[in-house]
């Protein structure tokens, strides 16, 4: 079947779906309107639908004879950002915006659902569409797994897409191995001894201690991580004091750690803790450190990724395939790909005629031609996996 032509035939519907979701964004685990629309459309297409998985998740099951079980995952949630775009489809929910493309993902997912239901002669097996809540920090994937989403039936292969403004529309990224980083957040409280700003000798200054810690943490990656590996240690907040002439009793640091493999992760976590506690001790202060795992690294299966790369080159040509598309950002689809071999596909969505806004930005928007491209690649990959 001519997948690209069929996907192009859905263009107007895909844009309408995407803009409707964009106008009505919902935060993680609150995606009731989005989930209701998705469930209604899936039922109309003949899918067996389960709602309320991990609060607001939706699962659509389409059985088409014996064969493999293949899963396609879509995330649904928006971000707590006030949109700054001047477009007809601007968010109608104050302080909430689809600033990472999940509106596009839902539209692509519904396009995939439509073509797979209309063209059952092109595939055999069971299609499991997972519309996931709470990707942006709520670990909705893990919650859905806890609710049994990977059972009855258990998928053999998993696919997921993400629109990607760093690459122009018409291009794709499908890289084997780690493509998104595992993430941890951390928090450290530095307790010193407060006093008058004019008499620092009578204090143990937690702000100076915290500043030394911030500087020392920059050595973790530069001096402990191999130059052939990669990691990120970021301090995102330093909170302390509220008066110009008072040295406070304490300070708080907050940050994140990003790594591609678990061995590096363990080493970086150890060094972060050692530096914080050791520097505080050197300065006469005390430090307590909390480390909080968020997501594991997202790792693409080599065989599934090779199939996706073939799909991209067959549909769009070799020049459409970008090599080594990776990021130190994290994605909780990693929880699914820990369990099921699969491929996380970056779909270029950057504008051809102007600079594309960054993800998680109040001006975020996409070239909507990416919607057709995403549908075409996923449908063709599904049909080959279940051919």
Image (cartoon, rainbow, N blue to C red):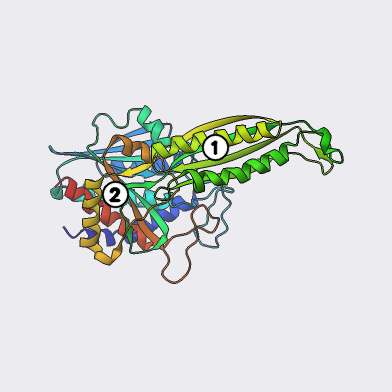
Q: Determine the residue positioned at 77% across, 35% down.
A: 248
The answer to which image quadrant residue 332 occupies is top left
Residue 176 tag number: 2
66 sits to left or right of 376:
left
The answer to which image quadrant residue 299 occupies is top left
Q: Secondary structure at mark 2?
A: loop
Residue designated by label 1: 272
Q: How many other residues sit within 10 Å of disc 2, few (<14), some (14-19) or many (≥20)?
A: many
Location of residue 354 in the rendering, given as x and y in whole percent from the top left corner: 47, 70
Q: Nearer the viewer, residue 143 or 54?
A: 143
Q: Determine the residue positioned at 28% across, 50% down.
A: 112
Question: In the rendered image, which quarter contains the N terminus?
Answer: bottom left
Q: Secondary structure at mark 1?
A: helix
Q: Determine the residue positioned at 24% across, 55% down.
A: 309
In this view, which residue lies farthest toward the bottom? 353
The answer to which image quadrant residue 283 occupies is top right
142 sits to left or right of 268:
left
Looking at the image, tell me whether mark 1 or mark 2 is earlier in sequence order: 2
In the rendered image, the vertical position of residue 43 relative to residue 146, given as above or below: below
How far apart marks 1 and 2 lie (CA) works out to: 29 Å
Pointers 1 and 2 in contact (CB under 8 A)? Answer: no
Mark whose residue sits in front, 1 or 2: 1
Q: Nearer the viewer, residue 189 or 169?
A: 189
How many tags in the picture?
A: 2
Residue 107 visible: yes
In the rendered image, the vertical position of residue 368 relative to residue 286, given as above or below: below
Location of residue 199 in the rendering, given as x and y in whole percent from the top left corner: 86, 38
Location of residue 315 in the rendering, given as x and y in whole percent from the top left corner: 22, 62
Location of residue 282 in the rendering, given as x and y in whole percent from the top left corner: 67, 33
Residue 9 visible: no
């Amino acid at each position: 079947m001519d997948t690209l032509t069929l996907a192009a035939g859905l263009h107007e519907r895909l844009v309408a779906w995407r803009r409707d979701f964009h106008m009505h964004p919902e935060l993680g685990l609150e995606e009731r309107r989005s989930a209701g629309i998705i469930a209604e459309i899936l039922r109309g297409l003949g899918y067996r639908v389960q709602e309320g998985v991990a609060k607001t998740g939706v699962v659509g099951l389409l059985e088409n004879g014996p064969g493999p079980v293949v899963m396609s995952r879509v995330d649904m949630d928006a971000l707590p950002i006030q949109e700054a775009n001047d477009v007809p489809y601007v968010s109608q929910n104050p302080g909430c915006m689809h600033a990472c493309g999940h509106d596009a993902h839902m539209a692509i997912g519904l396009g995939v659902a439509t073509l797979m239901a209309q063209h059952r002669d092109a595939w055999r097996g069971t299609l499991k569409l997972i519309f996931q809540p709470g990707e942006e920090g709520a670990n909705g994937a893990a919650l859905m797994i806890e609710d049994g989403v990977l059972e009855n039936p258990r998928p053999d292969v998993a696919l997921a897409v993400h629109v990607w403004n760093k690459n122009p529309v018409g291009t794709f990224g499908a890289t084997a191995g780690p493509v998104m980083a595992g993430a941890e957040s951390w928090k450290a409280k530095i307790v010193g001894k407060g006093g008058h700003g004019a008499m620092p000798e009578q204090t143990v200054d937690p702000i100076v201690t915290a500043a030394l810690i911030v500087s020392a943490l920059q050595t973790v990656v530069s001096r402990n991580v191999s130059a052939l590996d990669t990691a990120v240690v970021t301090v995102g907040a330093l909170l302390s004091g509220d008066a110009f002439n008072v040295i406070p009793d304490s300070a708080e640091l907050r940050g994140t750690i990003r790594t591609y493999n678990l061995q590096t992760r363990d080493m970086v976590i150890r060094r972060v803790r050692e530096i914080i506690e050791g520097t505080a001790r050197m300065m006469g202060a005390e430090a307590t450190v909390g480390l909080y795992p968020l997501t594991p690294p997202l790792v693409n299966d080599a065989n599934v990724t090779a199939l996706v790369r073939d799909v991209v080159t067959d549909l769009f040509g070799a020049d459409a395939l970008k090599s080594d598309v990776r990021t130190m950002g994290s994605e909780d689809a990693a929880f699914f790909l820990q369990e099921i071999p699969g491929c996380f596909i970056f779909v270029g969505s950057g504008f051809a005629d102007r600079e594309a806004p960054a993800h998680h930005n109040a001006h975020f928007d996409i070239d909507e031609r990416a919607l057709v491209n995403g549908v075409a690649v996923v449908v063709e990959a599904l049909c080959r996996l279940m051919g």
